[in-house]
């Protein structure tokens, strides 16, 4: 009788269809504490990466925002000196142009982090979190990352040549270090790519867990 029970128990899963056997294994794993801990560790790792990128671009954006004040003061000074005292310097006029470009290049990812870029849509704002996650996932992979790759492909030799020449302004009396200003093109690609990857991970976590990854790190090791 005992041998017959062992034989029946051994052949029960052998004769079961494959998809049912996998389902049983999946259900067993779902109730396995070790499986849940490992799953939470993976989620915590991805969520920690997203938060790290968010903090980086938050800091870069807030730091670059101070250039806005310097930009306004410089532009005001140029106008006062030119029209009030008849004075002007090429380097000072280029300075606020460079600051303007630096703000745009370095703070673009910060703007993306806060969803501040222009969206031409009808359904996105009022749609569910899962719908927005799908839109962000498809748009980032299909549009944003290829665009960043194309910009990097064109900008890399352009910036590299500028560094090789230690390029300066073409204008007499202009700013030195033009190669540094051109490097913001690559910084733009790097920061935007990091934020794009973070958005992809955030969207996937929302689609899997139906929760924002920011709430994953707030949970304990068992998600409670």
Image (cartoon, rainbow, N blue to C red):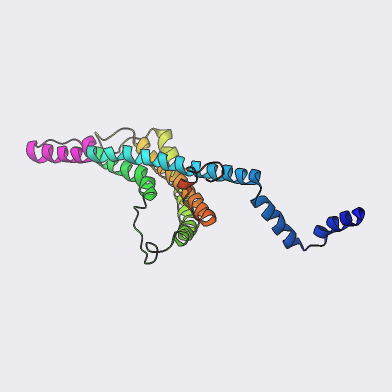
Q: Could you tell me if residue 158 is visible in this image?
A: no
- Would you place residue 61 above or below residue 208 in this image? above
* 117 in relation to 17, above or below: above
Residue range of the region highlighted in magenta in the rendering: 71-93
Left or right, 51 with reference to 85: right
- Give the x, y percent position of residue 153: 48, 47
Q: Of 43 and 30, which appears nearest the observer? A: 30
Decide whether the magenta segment is chiefly helix, strand or loop. helix
Magenta-drawn stretch contains 13: no
Quick one: 171 or 217, which is closer to the camera?
A: 217
Q: Quadrant of residue 167?
A: top left
Q: Which residue reaches farthest front?
A: 1
Q: Could you tell me residue 89's position as x and y percent?
A: 19, 35
Residue at x 44% of width, y 49% of height? 151
**Residue 27 in the image: x percent, y percent?**
67, 55
Horizontal relation, residue 2 to residue 132: left or right: right
Q: Position of residue 220 (x, y in %)?
A: 52, 41
Q: Is residue 116 visible?
A: yes
Residue in the foreground of this view, choosing between 67 and 85: 67
**The N terminus: image quadrant:** bottom right
Q: How many marks?
A: 0
In the image, taking residue 39 as reference, residue 155 lies left or right, namely left
Quarter of the image for residue 83 reads: top left
Q: Quadrant of residue 144?
A: bottom left
Is residue 37 or residue 212 the one in the foreground?
37
Residue placed farthest to the bottom in the image? 122
Question: In the orientation shown, which residue stands out farthest toward the left?
Answer: 84
């Amino acid at each position: 009788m005992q041998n017959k029970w062992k034989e029946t128990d051994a052949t029960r899963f052998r004769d079961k269809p494959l998809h049912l056997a996998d389902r049983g294994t999946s259900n067993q794993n779902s109730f396995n504490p070790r499986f849940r801990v490992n799953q939470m560790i993976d989620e915590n790792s991805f969520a920690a990466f997203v938060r790290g990128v968010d903090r980086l671009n938050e800091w870069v954006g807030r730091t670059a925002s101070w250039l806005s004040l310097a930009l306004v003061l410089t532009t005001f000074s140029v106008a006062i000196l030119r029209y009030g005292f008849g004075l002007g310097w090429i380097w000072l006029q280029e300075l606020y142009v460079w600051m303007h470009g630096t703000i745009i290049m370095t703070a673009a990812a910060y703007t993306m982090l806060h969803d501040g870029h222009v969206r031409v849509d009808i359904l996105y704002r009022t749609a569910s979190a899962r719908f927005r996650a799908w839109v962000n996932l498809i748009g980032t992979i299909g549009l944003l990352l290829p665009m960043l790759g194309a910009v990097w492909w064109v900008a890399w030799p352009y910036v590299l040549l500028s560094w090789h020449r230690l390029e300066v302004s073409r204008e007499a009396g202009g700013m030195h270090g033009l190669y540094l200003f051109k490097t913001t093109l690559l910084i733009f690609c790097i920061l935007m790519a990091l934020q794009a990857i973070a958005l992809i991970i955030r969207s996937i976590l929302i689609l899997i867990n139906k929760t924002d990854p920011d709430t994953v790190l707030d949970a304990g090791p068992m998600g409670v």
